[in-house]
Image (cartoon, rainbow, N blue to C red):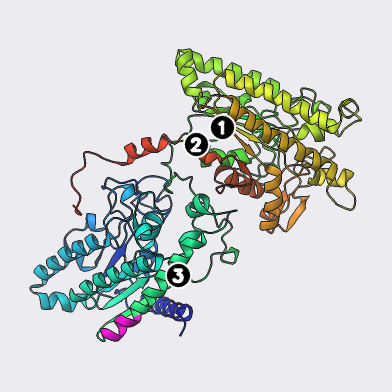
Amino acid sequence: MAIKTKALLVVSLLLLVANCMQYCVNGEPQVACFFIFGDSLSDNGNNNNLQTAAKANYNPYGIDLPEGATGRFTNGRTQVDFIAQYLGYAKPMPPYANTRGSDIFQGVNYASGAAGILYESGKRLGDNIYLGKQLNNHRLIYLEIDERLGGFDRAKQYLNKCLYYVNIGSNDYINNFFLPESYLSSRIYTLDQYTTILIDKLSEYIKELHNMGGRRFVLVGVGLIGCTPNAISTRGKDGMCVDEFDAAAFLFNEKLYALVQTFNNKFTDSKFIFINSTEGTIDGSLGFTVLNAACCPTRDDGQCYVHGVSQVPCLFIFGDSLSDSGNNNELPTTSKSNYRPYGVDFPFGPTGRFTNGQTTIDIITQLLGFENFIPPFANTSGSDILKGVNYASGGAGIRNETGSHLGGSISLGMQFANHKVIVSEIATRLGSPDLVQQYLEKCLYYVDIGSNDYMGNYFLPQFYPSSSMYSPEQYTQALIEELSLHVQALHEVGARKYVLAGLGLIGCTPGIMDSYGTNGSCLEEQNVAAFNFNNKLKALVDQFNNGFSADSQFIFIDTQALAIDLCDKHEFLVPAAPCCQPGLSGECIPDQMPCNNRNDYVFWDAFHTTEAWNLLNAITYYNSTTGSAYTYPMDIKHLVDYEITKMELELTNDSTSQPSATE
């Protein structure tokens, strides 16, 4: 029987029996005890007091557990927690570090984050409890059970009835073999030789467990380690899985499956099963909509940032309706959105955001670790300004006159003037120009503007003379030059980290296609203008990165290229129609019912996108793949100051803690 079929059959039978027995046996567990060996996939607190970056005893880990962050490397329960429940246990197995008294008779969890089969695996992150040490810890438990039951024979008879779960090996590849800068393994061995060493060492450990009474074993293979967000972002190409990593997992699993067959033939008094973790794929059919990105914002080592510790001290936002969060609410303009159905999916209802829920920059704000959204300049007060300000204004452009046919708006020049007011207030609070400079140098400046300079200026000759004064090339050059002056002015008041977002497919918005398109097609003239703007903006980023001092860094977001690829990769059922009923200006008609299936729509109204679309954009802006065509020369995650990692380790490590049970 093929590995694939056999593995699926075994898992199905286990789950079937587990569910049946859970209800058929008066609450009694199906095995006398459950012992767990492994890495971060199973760890539930053994690393908490170790000197290591591989720990998870802080928020947002455990966000969906009643007891909060326990040391589990997930938002809720782990796989072994669920298996313990299926086996009939009222509680998960306690971690060895916290095991006391009669707890040991139900089982112990020895797993340790970053641990491997080999001693050195994962040690670059700090201390861990490798598989050999986990077995030493189990030997101590075995001796204690022997003492309590009154002899080795009784202890073995008891342990014969227990289940032994072993899930380890991933770190021997991702935190050893595939890190030649830290380990020699790949220079000494071929992949096949190295994998054989792992299996041989694992075999020795399993035999030791057998000698101590183990008779029922679950041996879990290595999963698709090349398809984790960390692997894709650091080693993948064009957002694809790292085939080299996955090939290692397949090889390990083949050899592990052969070992299981050998053990079943050799130890006739025992039963070994193999779980093939590379079988199948996680896709939309299982209800998952985000398959290649982390739910929490992550550090370089793949761990979540500490919740509440933002990666930058402040975030300043400049832009138009794509980022506006309420600055237009009190302006005399038709470009406002502080009424229903706007905000139908936002926690605070209609706030002035031009979408059903969160904007792209709202989501980026959360990915950066801020607990609250950045407030609009119109409502900013007190110490709020130290976290940042949103100056964006619906209908606004780089040029002062842009969008004036709709009423009042806050142009980019006026937004920068408002920022100078805020900088003055920060100076008053901090008390020194030098302190202000040091503070603002660590902040992030996000600029997303220019669409209205085309849609609400150049391509409206009935309101603006721009198209009669400039050729498209001349006009685009004028926009870039004006934007350049404003950015240089920002630099003069302390800005050092910039995100300059390009224009999207402005010719493919429902408002443009309905008004100017032919047979529902995009208006290529506008898309070409956006494309040319983006090329010049990318060149400006190169110019700034080469011209300013090394402490300054600019990145460019190619929104248009991303939009094209997102449309290809994600099957939005309604890509070119608004979810709400738009009025003459393109905004939603007040109090009209929008569509119910909002996650299937790209556009919310005639010009602005839905929260579902904004989410996909924000994730890519923040954490794109290496060499991505969308974020140049890097993504937001790599732009921000990673000194925060040191701060987090100080928060999570207790240097005065007593030696742990594993030492």
Look at the numbered disc 2 and give the secondary structure of its residue. Answer: loop
Look at the numbered disc 3 and give the secondary structure of its residue. Answer: helix
Can you give x and y, in whole percent of width and height, for residue 184 in the image?
Answer: 34, 55
Closer to us: 330 or 417: 417
Residue 263 colored magenta? yes
Q: Which mark is residue 250?
A: 3
**Which residue lies most toward the front here?**
188
Give the mark toward the camera: 1 or 3.
3
- Inter-mark Cα distance, 2 to 3: 40 Å
Instruction: Determine contact: label 1, label 3, CB under 8 Å.
Output: no
Instruction: Determine contact: label 2, label 1, CB under 8 Å.
Output: yes
| Residue 420 appears left or right of 473 | left
- Pointer 1: residues within 10 angstroms few (<14), some, or many (20+)? many
Instruction: Determine contact: label 2, label 3, CB under 8 Å.
Output: no
Residue 330 visible in this rendered orientation of the protein: yes
Closer to us: 539 or 145: 539
Residue type, numbered disc 3:
Phe
Q: Which mark is residue 370?
A: 2
| Residue 491 appears left or right of 207 | right
- Pointer 2: residues within 10 angstroms few (<14), some, or many (20+)? many
Give the mark toward the camera: 2 or 3.
3
Q: Main secondary structure of the magenta part?
A: helix
- Inter-mark Cα distance, 2 to 1: 8 Å
Residue type, numbered disc 2:
Phe
Query: Which quadrant of the structure image shows residue 114?
Result: bottom left
Residue type, numbered disc 1:
Ile
Can you give x and y, in whole percent of width and height, for residue 388 in the image?
Answer: 54, 27
Can you give x and y, in whole percent of width and height, for residue 24 in the image?
Answer: 36, 79
Q: Which mark is residue 551?
A: none
Q: Which residue is mark 1?
A: 374
Query: Which quadrant of the structure image shows residue 6?
Result: bottom left
Residue bounds of the magenta highlight: 261-266
